[in-house]
Image: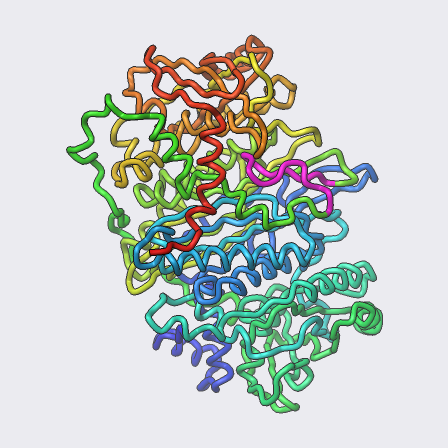
């Protein structure tokens, strides 16, 4: 457990003007933990843009909210969305850790009054072929994916997309970041505020047990050899009960009797009570003896710190309690008044009438220590800037074999083994699901659809946190633009190592500033998010891994997808061939998977050019000039062409005959990862070129689609030439093959 430091304990004494008792120390410990208070990052998070004309609720509430326009009923609609991490629990207990991560983010959404309609996940695991950790990593992958699918499928929310990456730095510390989005009208928005002096405070949902105690503190410390003993710190979820809780809460909200609502997430009852009181500048007084409990003999500290799942705290209008109780009785859930709102700003906790904790709400929730950690040093980077001397002669590369290696790599291969375990069509809103550049869900009762993209690249950020973070934002926005959506707002999950190490803190600061610069430029304010620090095991930190979730808006229409659709169509590379040198090539998937090394800097980004490319592709797609569209990212041009050629599983793919002329060597030209490039197949190339000219971006005709084969010529030399089915076999079967047990 992460304890209060000596200086923090002194601050507690100053606030209380006395010595704290055991329960109060426990309360301060969890609320001032890194996980709950962001004491190392708050100073720098203020640099992020958080406002726009669309933002209705920004950081500070359970989820951000943006306006999405008017519905057919004439009322204005909104979406709530957020991303959260459940990294440490998913290492200790992969199934429950991931499952309760899904449950927690869903409660963040419906506590705002929104009905969840989509989930996405960003996953990071250690490598599956690691001779020491490989079998354990496989078990973690299988457990995490099972946990996500179990909770989402049982709850009845579609898991519509995500990403999955494998790197050695995640061997002892996987990352499980879960994004959720919900919809509602403006008049259905609720807040986590304990308003109205004398109003009853009502506990609803599951009974409280000992699971999850000190979970927030566990998430605020590094892993050691004893971490597996923290299994009791991991919560246990029940998705069926959460479904009942969702329906009961939304129905109770519609009665008009509820004035405030908050989920019991990290720090459980402690966090929900003090945050609701702090936001409303009120106090809350309640008695632990009234809290429904499923275990006997629980101490006040255990009840206050329990993170048992599927629980909510409501504040109702005095005299209307029975309206709330009747709703929860209908759904078979506990609902009991445990206290009331007071006017003294104090969190007053009683146990059978005896006061066991008395703490000022605002100081507890909002006055946690704020640290300006030392970061005036170069961010830690795991590789040299210059390429190795051995990287000189590449004329004899077998690009066919190299492309197959990339398509079969853990990062780039098909993730259908994962998403086939998810129900991504439940509720019938999904227009584009897993496997595309962006997921799309329609908003019924409007003519609007919401596109979502989730992206991260720890390798880029390890080489340059600022440049890597800017590239993440650009790629998320490009993914949205490629399906025709206008990016409008973002949420982020910042996964880093120990902030007490200056070189790690420097990574965090650089990444935050990079995200801020790019989000400002692309007009995608941050509406909320999560910071996960101390992602280290035995002193080895993960790579800096910010994950961006960006949403975009579009008119509901049949989606433009990745695969080529017809023979004889012109293939255009919008944005041009891009530029790259050997230094910028060193962070690519090619260097990782084919050359098994790492060096250099991330690809160079011109944000102004990127924005123009995105404007061009949006117009091309929205006006119906693209039969297919796909952005270039990991693996560069050759991988993107292969992905466009493979179609869906079991289909005869439409490939292409491609010719490019470039001063770059073949391996750089085919596999570099310069941004701001999108492949388009079209029957009207002149129109696509005109729109590109209007936006002052390149549009190169590089070939024509053809049946069943992909051929790529570089400077009049054929470098890749293979049947599409052969590439598809490698691509589709790689992950399942890597997960299979190894028999010696």
Q: Quadrant of the C terminus?
A: bottom left
Q: Is residue 252 left or right of residue 581?
A: right
- Between residue 327 and residue 56, name the one nearer to us: 327
Q: Is residue 503 above or below residue 94?
A: above
- For the point 41% across and 25% down, which residue is it? 637
| Residue 731, percent from left and from top | 46, 36
- For the point 51% across and 65% down, which residue is it? 366
- Between residue 682 and residue 201, name the one nearer to us: 682
Residue 525 at least partly seen: no
Q: Is residue 490 left or right of residue 276?
A: left
- Between residue 448 and residue 713, name the one nearer to us: 713
Q: Is residue 123 left or right of residue 649?
A: left
Instruction: Write down the quadrant of residue 279 in the picture.
Output: bottom right
Residue 212 at least partly seen: yes
| Residue 698, percent from left and from top | 45, 15
Question: For residue 303: magenta?
Answer: no
Residue interval drawn in magenta: 427-443
| Residue 115, percent from left and from top | 71, 52
- For the point 50% across and 37% down, which residue is it? 476
Q: Is residue 53 above or below residue 312?
A: above
- For the point 82% across and 38% down, which residue is it? 74
Q: Is residue 270 above or below residue 81?
A: below
């Amino acid at each position: 457990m992460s304890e209060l430091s000596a200086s923090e304990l002194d601050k507690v004494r100053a606030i209380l003007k006395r010595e704290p008792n055991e329960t109060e120390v426990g309360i301060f410990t969890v609320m001032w933990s890194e996980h709950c208070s962001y004491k190392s990052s708050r100073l720098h998070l203020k640099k992020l843009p958080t406002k726009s004309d669309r933002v209705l609720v920004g950081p500070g509430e359970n989820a951000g909210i943006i306006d999405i326009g008017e519905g057919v009923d004439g009322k204005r609609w909104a979406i709530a969305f957020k991303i959260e991490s459940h990294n440490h629990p998913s290492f200790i207990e992969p199934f429950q850790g991931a499952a309760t991560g899904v449950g927690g983010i869903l409660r963040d959404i419906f506590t705002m009054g929104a009905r969840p309609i989509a989930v996405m996940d960003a996953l990071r695991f250690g490598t599956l072929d690691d001779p020491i950790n490989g079998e354990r990593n496989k078990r973690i992958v299988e457990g995490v994916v099972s946990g996500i699918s179990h909770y989402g499928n049982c709850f009845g929310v579609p898991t519509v997309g995500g990403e999955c990456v494998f790197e050695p730095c995640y061997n002892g510390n996987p990352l499980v970041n879960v994004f959720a989005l919900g919809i509602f009208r403006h008049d259905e928005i609720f807040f986590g505020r304990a308003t109205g002096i004398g109003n009853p405070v009502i506990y609803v949902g599951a009974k409280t047990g000992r699971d999850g105690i000190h979970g927030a503190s566990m998430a605020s410390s590094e892993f050691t050899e004893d971490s597996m003993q923290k299994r009791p710190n991991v919560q246990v979820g029940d998705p069926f009960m959460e479904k009942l809780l969702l329906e009961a809460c939304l129905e109770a909200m519609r009665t008009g009797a509820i004035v405030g609502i908050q989920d019991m997430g990290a720090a459980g009852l402690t966090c929900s009570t003090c945050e609701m009181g702090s936001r409303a500048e009120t106090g809350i007084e309640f008695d632990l003896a009234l809290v429904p409990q499923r275990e006997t003999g629980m101490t006040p500290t255990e009840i206050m710190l329990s993170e048992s799942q599927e629980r909510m705290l409501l504040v109702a209008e005095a005299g209307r309690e029975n309206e709330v109780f009747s709703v929860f009785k209908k759904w078979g859930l506990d609902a009991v008044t445990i206290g009331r709102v007071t006017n003294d700003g104090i969190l007053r906790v009683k146990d059978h009438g005896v006061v066991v904790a008395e703490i000022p709400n605002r100081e507890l929730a909002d006055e946690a220590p704020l640290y300006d950690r030392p970061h005036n040093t170069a961010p830690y980077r795991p590789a040299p800037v210059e390429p190795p001397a051995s990287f000189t002669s590449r004329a004899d590369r077998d690009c066919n074999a190299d492309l197959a290696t990339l398509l079969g790599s853990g990062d780039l291969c098909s993730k259908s083994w994962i998403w086939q375990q998810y129900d991504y069509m439940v509720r019938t809103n999904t227009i584009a699901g897993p496997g595309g550049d962006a997921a799309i869900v329609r908003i019924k009762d409007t003519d609007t659809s919401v596109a979502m993209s989730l992206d991260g690249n720890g390798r880029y950020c390890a080489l340059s946190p600022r440049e890597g973070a800017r590239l993440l934002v650009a790629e998320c926005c490009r993914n949205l633009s490629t399906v025709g959506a206008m990016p409008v707002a973002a949420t982020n999950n910042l996964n880093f190592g120990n902030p007490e190490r200056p070189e790690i803190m420097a990574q965090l600061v650089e990444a935050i500033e990079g995200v801020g610069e790019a989000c400002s430029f692309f007009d995608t304010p941050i509406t909320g998010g999560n910071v996960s620090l101390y992602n280290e095991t035995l002193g080895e930190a993960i790579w800096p891994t910010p994950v961006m979730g960006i949403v975009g808006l579009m008119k509901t229409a049949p989606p433009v997808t990745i695969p080529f659709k017809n023979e004889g169509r012109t293939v255009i590379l919008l944005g041009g061939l891009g530029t790259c040198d050997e230094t910028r090539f060193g962070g690519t998937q090619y260097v990782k998977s084919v050359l098994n090394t790492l060096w250099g800097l991330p690809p160079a980004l011109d944000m102004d050019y990127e924005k123009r490319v995105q404007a061009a592709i949006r117009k091309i797609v929205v006006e119906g000039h693209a039969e297919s569209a796909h952005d270039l990212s990991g693996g560069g041009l050759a991988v993107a062409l292969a992905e466009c050629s493979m179609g869906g599983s079991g289909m005869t793919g439409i490939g292409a005959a491609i010719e490019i002329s470039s001063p770059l060597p073949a391996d750089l030209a085919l596999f570099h990862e310069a941004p701001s490039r999108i492949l388009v197949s079209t029957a009207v190339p002149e129109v696509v070129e005109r729109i590109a000219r209007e936006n002052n971006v390149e549009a190169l005709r590089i070939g024509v689609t053809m049946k069943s084969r992909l051929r790529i010529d570089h400077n009049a030399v054929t470098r890749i030439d293979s049947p599409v089915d052969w590439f598809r076999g490698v691509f589709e079967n790689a992950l399942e093959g890597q997960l299979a047990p190894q028999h010696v």
